[in-house]
Image (cartoon, coloured by chain):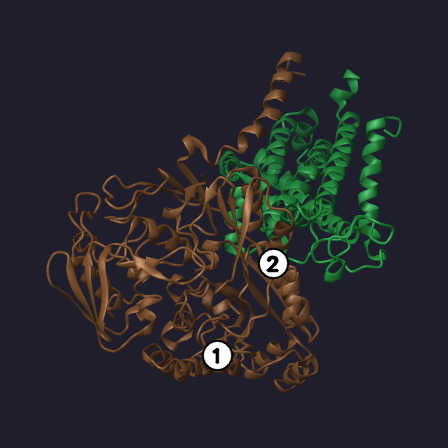
Chain colours: A brown, B green
Amino acid sequence: MSGISLSRRQMLAALAAAGFSPALYRSAALAQGGKVLKVRSYADIQNLDPAFRKGAPEDDVMRNIFVGLADMTPGDTWKWRLDAASKLEQTDATHIDFTLMDGLVWSDGHGPVTADDVKFSFERMADPKLDSPYKGDWEVLDHVEVKDDKSGTIVLKAPFPPLWNVGLVFGSGKIVSRKAVEAMGGRFDTKPPAQSGRYLLKEWQPKQRVVLARNPDWKGEAPYFDEIHVIPIEDAKTAELGLEAGDIDYTWVEASSIPRFKKTPPKGGKLAVKPSLAYVWLGMNVEAAPFDKLEVRQAVQKAIDVPSVLEAAYFGAAEPATGIIAPGLIGHREKTLYSFNLDAARELLKKAGLDSGFECTLSILNTTEFTSAAQAVQANLAEIGITVTIQQYDSGTFWSLGDQKSGDSWKKVQLIINRFSMQPDPSFATDWFTPEQIGVWNWERWNSPEFGELNKKAKIELDTQKRNEMYVRMQDLMDESGAYVFLTHGAVGVCTSDKIEPALMPNGNPIFHGFKATA
Amino acid sequence: MLREPMGLLGIGLVLLIVLGALFAGLTGYSPSKLAMRDRFLDPSFTHLLGTDHLGRDLFTRVLHGARIALGVAFVATGISFIGGLILGMIAGYGPRWLDSLLLLLFDSLRAFPTVMLALALVTLTGPSLAAVVLVVVLATLPGYARVVRAQTMSLKTTEFVLSARSLGAPSWRILAVHIMPNLIGPLVILVSMDIPVVITIEAGMSFLGLGVRPPTPSWGAILNDGYAFIRESAWPAIAGGLPIIIATLGFTFLGETLRDHLDPRLRQDG
């Protein structure tokens, strides 16, 4: 028999190399003299146009390659700070003056960043013709008045409290180049035609990594790292192992891992726990039989024992949610209108003519956390005769399931466990459940004109008490629709290498350009 | 065969898995019922392999997982066996144009890496046991068919086949009565050697979330859960990995021993 033959000496050398290699792993992430930051993202980027970004993975990258007039500061309280503006001042309820800082230029020879670029960026977000899913962030924008190359005034149709918490300081406030974007036909996807941030998008290897390199033309305070490598790892548990192996410097960890990491910090790393604003819920497609019947949806609401689902998925590290608005924000409710009651659930199914039960599907993102939650939901619903088949999807497929423009999969969605990230204003939670969002982000396809109207009114309401009541009412409407079972806001555990000093917003969102090496 | 230690060990390990699958229902636990209070219990007389992150008895899940593994292995290799036999004989005995066409089909299927094939199929059909079986059949059938084709081409020029043909026997009879019996032996060896490969394909697909759906206790899914929670407890990972090792070793030893006994060339070589 022929084959590979190894001498004793070769075998020993190979074993020695294999045994020695783990010692190199720990320094791998912070290689190249401590100038490369390797961070984990829970999904790959899909669109870097601020008007069409998909979620947090894009936000985390855009924050580095684009600038806004202002952004959020790292720390434990929500505060904004100047970003590309040297001056930003609200002169009255509907006017905000701004002046851009000196030396801001676009990459790829597109010239200086101007006030006209600001006008273009904000007005295009609100433009109904562009139909950005985020147009709500700028829906009261009247226009932007350009005074000169570097200064102008944002003119609003009405006072707009969410602007300072959402529109100006997050993705919807990022400035893009008029010249470059118009040359691309008015929008772009994963190849930004011009960038102006602290970093530039150097390379994108789909499903492998995004490489951001320091922008040589950046005139503000220089970021510490030469490069940031954003590595998409869907499963947080896998990322935790990656952090402990030294392959990455930053990751969110699953809530179920927080108790363990609190007890014993990750090897070579440290844990920070932040209150989460995000919300996780079980949704029902109101157009998909049998969930088109209110009684069936209400039966599901009453059959889910939320604490048991949280125990399965989060090991008790997360509290039940009472809606989509987290504690501490305007509009947070004390309790839901429904409660766990199996007898009532069975009665409702009987009323719907389905007392012998039925079969349905539950769509989830293929992660340990959601798979555990789905199995608990499956067990809960089995108690009232509903047989649930769990369908797991990778992130690319999952995040287009309810999107009408991505195909017909939205028709097949019945039950779905979903998680949306959040910004510190209640409007950013409610915006996705309006009638206009049906087939975009409203995957339950719940159509409530009252909810839509309230959402518009609440955004421009200046009286905090009245605003609070509106958001509470909106969540009551969601309860009454039967289409939602609110599960949790989760808990944010952020693990970083102990060689890194992270810059995190109060909810744990990373500001990568603010990350430094520990002294 | 029973006198050879490898063969004996193979039979013992395979029997262990088969008996485990047959008597999986006797452990007193459900493989899928959640019992969160019993999460990550270490092995004991109550839970022989401990419990997983949802408090389920791992021993019970492993035994039920054996049903999935053996079911997929036997069903998928059975289909591949029959399909490979029929298509291989047609290719080897039929007209040249049909042979070329079938060869093109076999080679095209073999060109796909199994994981890519699995990903593509699961994207189209969604993860399920049927998808796993389909992947295994598409991955293994061309190999069997090619072996059968080569053997058939060699057998069709032998004297006993030529004399049957000269006596006016129809093609189907020649294939069924004269050629097929000579193909079964080598194919059985090949199939028996492939069963551990099929078991690992099923486990691999379930590990990646492309196989059976939760809470079905596939070994790959148990291993995946164990991997995710390895810092909390090592037992779920051990419970998922151990049966895969036992099954692959058992079927490999058994297959090799079968080959040694059934392959006349190896028998002669002693």
Between label 1 and label 2, give the one nearer the viewer: 1
Please provide percent x and percent y for residue A149: 12, 56
Task: Name the residue nearer the viewer: A320 or A150.
Answer: A150
Q: Earlier in the sequence, mark 1 or mark 2?
A: 2
Please provide percent x and percent y for residue B102: 52, 39
At label 2, which amino acid type do we have?
Thr
Please provide percent x and percent y for residue A88: 23, 62
Image mark 2: chain: A
**What is the distance, in whole Å, between disc 1 and disc 2 at their CAs?**
26 Å
Relative placement, left or right, of A486 versus A157 is right
At label 1, which amino acid type do we have?
Gln
Q: Are marks 1 and 2 on the same chain?
A: yes
Residue that numbered label 1 is attached to? A475
Relative placement, left or right, of A218 versus A278 is left
Relative placement, left or right, of A53 versus B130 is left
When asked about the image quadrant of residue A127, the answer is bottom left
Q: Given the current orientation, which residue lies at the most extreme front position?
A: A519
Q: Which element carries disc 1, helix, strand or loop?
A: helix
When asked about the image quadrant of residue B237, the answer is top right
Q: Which element carries disc 2, helix, strand or loop?
A: helix
Assess disc 1: are there few (<14), some (14-19) or many (≥20) residues with their C-alpha within 10 Å of its C-alpha: many
Please provide percent x and percent y for residue B198: 66, 41
Residue that numbered label 2 is attached to? A371
